[in-house]
Amino acid sequence: MLGSYSMNTIKAVIFDLDGTLVKLPIDWDNVRRKVRELLKTDHPLKPLGVGVYEVTRNNPKLMAEAFKLIEFEELKAAEKTKYDSKLYELIKNLKRLGLKLGLVTLQGVKSATIVLRKLNIIDFLDVVVTREKSVYRIEQLKIALKKLNVKPSETLFIGDTVWDREAGDSLGCKTLIVGCDIANVVEVEGIVRKVLRSTFNP
Ligand SMILES: [Mg+2]
């Protein structure tokens, strides 16, 4: 994928959390089943946060209950997050290269904070956008780009789902999907270095 990869410059990298930086031990299909029961719906709830938001938008109390249930599962999983030295090195090195770093996640702020602390990377992140800000990935990315004060064309977005691809592409971010464009998020450092080298030595 490196061969087909081109960017004129790179100023920021924005990461998704679950499935991209870490794999949280959450059985999402089981959580969806529980939420469907609570909401008395057969909505697919994919992505989950968006589904809940759409099903309960006229019932704030039920929405709060559903997110409470999801948060309970997230917090259980978040506590099990293990420090990952390769991931830590990646984030630290990207920061040393002078990049702005952001994170967008459909997790709630409580569990996201626990996970990022356990990974010891929270202090490297210039912006963290959780589902409390928006459940829509595209809106999350817009918020992050604004906060980082960078253009989509100068930004690399790393996600793991087709929704990530759609959101990143539609904004004009360079989007890489783990498990498709790259096997592992740690490959991002090599890609960034390659772009930076070509920027300084065109
Ligand atoms: Mg993900």
Image (cartoon, rainbow, N blue to C red):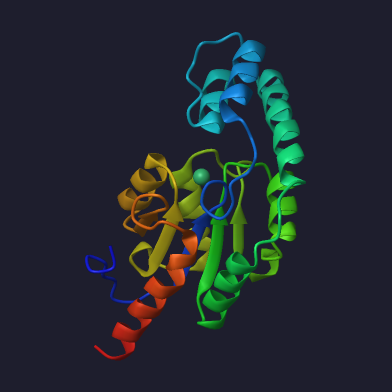
The quarter of the picture where residue 157 lies is bottom left
Q: Which quadrant: the C terminus?
A: bottom left
In percent of width and height, residue 145 lies at 47, 61
* Residue toward you, 176 or 199: 176
Residue at image point 52% right, 25% down:
51
Residue at image point 56% right, 32% down:
49
Q: Which quadrant: the N terminus?
A: bottom left
Q: Is residue 38 left or right of residue 79?
A: left
Q: Is residue 100 left or right of residue 10?
A: right
Residue at image point 34% right, 44% down:
166
- Position of 76 relative to 55 (above/below): below
The quarter of the picture where residue 57 lies is top right
In percent of width and height, residue 128 lies at 61, 57
Residue 125 seen in this snapshot: no
* Residue toward you, 56 or 19: 19
In percent of width and height, residue 104 lies at 55, 52
Q: How many dots with numbers? A: 0
Q: Is residue 100 left or right of residue 9?
A: right
Residue ranking furthest to the bottom: 201
Residue 41 seen in this snapshot: yes
- Position of 115 relative to 101 (above/below): above
The quarter of the picture where residue 90 lies is bottom right
Residue at image point 64% right, 11% down:
37
In percent of width and height, residue 162 lies at 37, 41
